[in-house]
Amino acid sequence: ESMFSDIKIAPPIEVFSLTAKFNEDNRPIKVNLGVGAYRTNEDKPWVLPVVRTVEAQMACDTTLNHEYLPVGGLPEFSYNAMKLLLGDDNPVFTENRVLGTQALGGTWGLKLAAEFMHRHLGVDVVYVSKPTWGNHKGIFKDAGFSQIKEYRYWKADTRSLDIDGMLEDLKNAPERACVILHGCAHNPTGVDPTNEQWKMIADVCEERNLTIVMDIAYQGFATGKLDEDAAAVRYMQSRGFEMFIAQSFSKNFGLYNERVGNLVTVTKSNDAVLKVKSQMDLIVRTMWSNPPNHGARIVCSVLNNPGYLSEWKEQVKMMAERIRMMRHQLRQKLISLGTPGSWEHINTQRGMFSYTGLTEAQVDVLQSRYHIYMLKSGRINMCGLTSNNIDYVADAIHAVVS
Ligand code: PMP
């Protein structure tokens, strides 16, 4: 009798099992629109040239070593990351009322925020957008939140933001409940609020005294411009909220497996920063003790150096532009095929993903008959499209929709 004999097999994680199925598929023509990672027009992962340059230098730099980092991570990494997010001249820096804690990707930044809120702020209810990134609910549930609630976000009939539903649901949230807001390039819908809508969202957060967590995993992917993509975060912060912001560098640096993230805590005073830091460090201590160096060192070296910084900005823009081109082309092709329905949403959605509006049944047929893989929700990663496969994908979508 094994001590593991009563263990139940857990359900598969959709996005990873989809990739496994895709890899096992040995048909010559197949397309993976599932995974959330950038691909070149040759359908290959991309190591950013500026990352290669910095890695090569790091390999030869004999002043670097493999000593442990401080519990909270590389301070200059967090500082530069926060300047990228909040803007160089943001008064929070001179007023010393912002804290950066290096985390293992955006995932652990969120986890850290969740643990902190639950242990120290008595926050027990979280609101996530409906739909949201597949991991939000689990992270907060594991941190002990007793209620995981959804606010309306995607309006299927108009394929756009349900702002009225969203505001109404947040108005009905209990005081101090946590609300997760996607900073830009919402995953999975690709739909972001407008400036006017952000103002209304901020008003409700203020009125209900909600505890704000902004999740920004795609800075640069929405418009191709780093500052513009930070506008919502900067606006919310400028309204005077104390808040958490989970930053990820997985996508915009292509450092997926290096786990580079930063949890930003904005407070009202330096006194609060010191208290929060002491408790944040204790949470990190039992979770990962101290973070890995390599990826954070790369990001820090780029953000610190004006030459590398402008190279990187160009490379982010290239990624965003390729995605935009694929959006445009897919929509054009569906229109010229006469595919029923309006496909304008593919064009106006932003970031890596598009919520196509394809039904689960259509997604099934796309997979079984055409070997095109996407999430059951109809979310596609635009980067899975290339000049080589876009006609094939458009024809297949046309066939399943018509
Ligand atoms: N938030 C959102 C909305 C995401 O899409 C992702 C990544 N898919 C993350 C957070 C986590 O990113 P990371 O891989 O850096 O943990």
Image: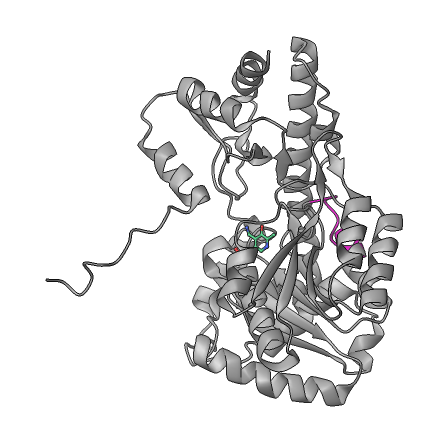
What is the total number of numbered labels drawn onto the structure image?
0
Write down which quadrant ligand 1 falls in: bottom right
Q: Is residue 14 left or right of residue 82?
A: left
Looking at the rendered image, the quarter that the C terminus falls into is: top right
In depth, the one of 144 and 327 nearer the eye is 144
**Residue at image point 44% right, 80% down:** 286
Looking at the rendered image, the quarter that the N terminus falls into is: bottom left
Q: Is residue 343 above or below residue 98?
A: above
In depth, the one of 70 and 207 nearer the eye is 207
Would you say residue 223 sits in the magenta stretch? Answer: yes
User: Residue 41 occupies which quadrant of the picture?
Assistant: top right
In the rendered image, is residue 217 in sight? yes
In the rendered image, is residue 70 in sight? no
Q: Is residue 16 above or below residue 235?
A: above
* Percent of width and height locating residue 246: 63, 64
Would you say residue 166 sits in the magenta stretch? Answer: no
* Percent of width and height locating residue 107: 53, 61
Q: Is residue 356 above or below residue 68?
A: above
**Residue at image point 57% right, 23% down:** 387
* Percent of width and height locating residue 160: 75, 36
**Colour mode of the rendering:** one colour
**Residue at image point 38% right, 46% down:** 12
* Percent of width and height locating residue 231: 80, 55
Q: Which residue range is magenta in the image?
A: 222-231
Q: Is residue 352 left or right of residue 373?
A: right
